[in-house]
Image: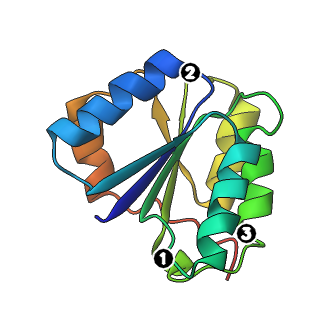
Amino acid sequence: MNKILLIDDDGINNFINERLFRKLEIAGHIEIRRNGKEAIEYLCQICEENEACPELIVIDINMPEMNGFEFLEEFKNLEMLNKHNTRVVMLSTSTSQRDIEKLKNLNIGLVRKPLCEEKIRELMNEDHVYHGYN
């Protein structure tokens, strides 16, 4: 992968997750944003510069300003190069059946925190591609 976008308001989770992805040499470039609003602003910026969308977006559900579900609503309306190839996965501690059902309906995978090497390897072999923008 060329680019991964990690979106989580927890700085420690971001630090650990970035290190895991770097250790596994999965992506050449890893971007981190602290909430969905910052992530949408970043994605709009790369759209203007005609850069391709990240191949993987890992997002937390519960964040300030714009949560994971609000991010997904905004993301589906963005016009981006190669967005159809973007894999979007929720990384959360949520056990809410409502959250799980929402994710199933959106065709988004849920990975339980904390992220570890085994979960990343499984994630890379599964098809959690967000199709809501087609």
Please give left or right for residue 120 compared with residue 75 in the image: left
Where does label 3 land, which residue? 76
Few, some or many residues within 10 Å of mark 1 (<14, 14–19, 20+): some
Residue 63, x across and y down, in percent: 72, 28
Spatial CA span between label 1 and label 2: 30 Å
Mark 3 or 2 closer to N-term? 3
Please give left or right for residue 29 compared with residue 79 in the image: left
Classify 49 as above or below 16: below
Q: Amino acid at mark 2?
A: Thr
Residue extending farthest to the left is 24
Classify 15 as above or below 75: above
Residue 6, x across and y down, in percent: 49, 42
Spatial CA span between label 1 and label 3: 15 Å
Where does label 1 land, which residue? 52
Please give left or right for residue 119 compared with residue 55 in the image: left
Mark 1 or 2 closer to N-term? 1
Q: What residue sits 59% from the left and 69% below the top?
A: 46
